[in-house]
Structure formats: C-alpha cells, structure tokens
Amino acid sequence: MNHPLSGIGDGRLGYVSSAPVRSAPDTGSASFYFSSGRRKISARGIAEHIAAPLGYDSGQREDFHKTIASALNRAKAYGQKNPLVIGALPFDSAQPATLYIPREVTVSEGSGAEHNAAPDVALAEKPSAAVVRVESIPAEARFKQAVEQAVANFRLSDIRKAVLSRILNIELNGMIDTDAVFRRLCAQNPSGYHFRLPLADGSELIGASPELLLRKEGPRIYSNPLAGSAKRQLNAADDRRVSEMLCGSAKDNYEHKLVIDDIRQVLAPFCAGLDVPDKPSLINTPAMWHLSTYITGTVSAPSVTALEIASRLHPTPAVCGFPTRQAHKLINLVEPYERGPFAGMVGWCDSHGDGEWVVTIRCGRIERNTAQIFAGAGIVEDSSPEAEWAETQAKMQTMLKALGVTL
C-alpha cells in the first residue's frame, strides 16, 4: 500500500537556500530510490541539494546536522508534513555529502526488490553492450603489495585492522542501460538494501548493500555489521563446508570482534539498553557468506535522529579498520585514489528522526558507457595477499553480474 507524503509536489518547493545548501541543476527529473525488507522509498525532484561535509570535529558535525534540520524545517514550511533527506555520505567525512530534500516522496510498506519488474523478467534481460576496456586500480601486484605493507605496519603500530580496497573501471562499447542494470541487481539480490541516486558529477550510484549501519524507528535502533567473509560455492556440499570454515576461522572471528566492540562502544552512550549477541551468526548473499551480528537497542533521548547516530558510527571498522583514525591514515597512504561514495553510507532520515542508513558496498557508479565498481577486504595480521585479492574479486561479482560482465 502506498502512502504519499501530503503537501509534496505542489510546485512551491523549488527554492534556493543559502550555502552550504544549494539547489541542484535538475529539479524535475531527478529520482531517488531506497528499499529494504521493510519499506520502499521512491522520490522525485529536488527541493534542496545539501553538499556540506560531515566533518571530523564536533563543531563541524554540529553545523552539519543543523543544516539538515534547517532544510527539513523549510520543507515543512512549504507544505510537507514529514519531509525526509535522502542520499549518500562519502567514506572521507571531509568530502562533501550528496544529500537531497526531494519534492515528491512515496513510501510503500514491504520490500521493493522487484523495482518495477518481476524478478524472472529482470534476470532474463541481456546486456546489449560489450566490454572494451577494464582497469583495476590498484592492479593485482600493487594491491597484494599493499596488503603486505599493511601487515608489516601492524607489527610496528597500534593498528589491528585496515580495510584495503580497489576500484574496477569498465568501459563498454555502448550506452549502459542503468534501469536494466538496477532491475537485474535487485532481482539477483532480493534480500539486499537497494539504492539508486544521482551524484554531483553526473553519474548515478546504484547498489544492493547487505550491511545495515543503522535503522531507527521511534526509540528503537538496529544495526547489523558484517565482517569476515567467504566466497559462495556452486556445489552445495562445498558451500556448506566454506560456511562452516568461516564460522570456525580465528582470523575472521577476530576481525569481526574488532568491529562489534567498536560499534558497541559508539552506540552505548545513546542507549538506555543495548543488546549485542555474544557470537556472530551467518548470513549470505548470492556471492558471499558473512559473519553477522544483529544489534538492537533503545535510545535514551528520542529526539536523536537516525542520521546523527549513523554518522557517529561511520566509518565502522568493517570498511575502515581499527583503531579508526589510525587505519584511515594508513588507507590514505596505500590507496592510490579517493573512495568517494564507496564505503560511505547511503539512506534516508525523516523529520521525526526515523530512518535507515546502510554501508555503501556492493555498488557502482554508472555514467554513459562507463561503470566503476568497488570492493574491499579487511586486513589483519594473519591476512594473505592472495586470499584478500580473491575476496575483492568475489565481492565484485554482485555488480559484474548485474552489468552482464564476465571477467
């Protein structure tokens, strides 16, 4: 059942606000989409584009959240009963966010995984363009060298984990049908958190993340961090064996515990009660097995928003490392590019403070005939360069299959 938010789309919301909020170039055709197993958010048009950075110091972060609150209040003044902000924050909080106050929003209960096409129809669609160029940044040898460099650094510092990543740039011989790619992505990953939105550089960000950073519904909060992964196998017996090995892996359980302990420490001050299971469980996507811990809590101050709590969690050790600040410095030393939206957070938050934010993984940027996809691997002292490279290969399969690319 659809629930259009009243007062939206009456033509009065195309205003321009003062910096750091600015109007976006396209106020009519821009569209946004986010879905989970609980609800689907479909939005269209831009009332405001918020490009301020979250920042790292407390003063800058306070200003950022005041900017969001002011934009939502203006939307209320122009007729929206419960406006929302939707978009993405980058991995590096010093970089500008890509957030929007949409003009028209429809909320549907339940999963939106079909994305306007039956799953069997979406899966049957065949890409029409062929690959003409593929480039990995860094290349395989340099990525493996970076893993060795990180492991060596662990022995000389307090860093216990660093997530190293790579980007795959793909050029096709024809325009990419982003609608079709997104339909296939949703159909192939029906249990994921699906998102699609425009970025400031003219590309579109699409993805099917398996990892919930933070959901808030009234006083209740939920988080489902993932850390520790293994590639799925075609043979059922092999697949079961791989999942059992992951459960028993000392390396992966250690990596997972670093993440959970950090998230517990961040969430505890917000909560009157917090439930963190003692041991991880297993979840899977079509491409990967993951160690998973489902955390629940009750906030002590109901006025705190989903975006405020999520931005305190971001970036978690699952996509950065531990300790976070030192791991971030190491990443900047060894990764030869800016991650941009990758390994950031994407989602929405309404004027009541409710919302959903997921980790921006299993995703890609698409523009004209090019696609850029991303994958990372958690490096700890026991990591093997060959195994970590293989893990990034496996994680990229989510987007590669949606693009119809075989490498």
Image: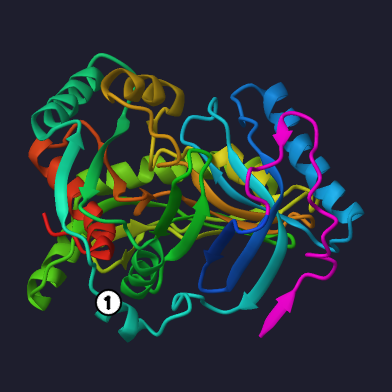
Identify the residue at image location x=53%, y=28%: 95
**Residue farthest right in this picture:** 77
Which segment is the magenta one? 1-27
Magenta stretch: includes residue 56:
no
Q: Give coordinates of residue 232: x percent, y percent.
A: 17, 65
Q: Can residue 235 be seen in this view?
A: yes
Q: Give coordinates of residue 258: x percent, y percent.
A: 38, 39
**Residue farthest top in this picture:** 156
Q: Give coordinates of residue 276: x percent, y percent.
A: 50, 55
Res 113 quadrant in image: bottom left
Res 59 quadrant in image: top right
Q: Quadrant of the N terminus?
A: bottom right
For the stretch drawn in magenta, the main secondary structure is loop
Residue labelled with disc 1: 125
Above or below: residue 240 compared with residue 213 = below
**What kind of residue is marked 1?**
Glu
Above or below: residue 187 compared with residue 55 = below
Q: Can residue 250 be seen in this view?
A: no
Q: Is residue 243 left or right of residue 54?
A: left
Q: In this view, does 13 lie to the left or right of 135?
A: right
Q: Give coordinates of residue 342: x percent, y percent.
A: 40, 42
Identify the residue at image location x=61%, y=59%: 29
Identify the residue at image location x=40%, y=57%: 207
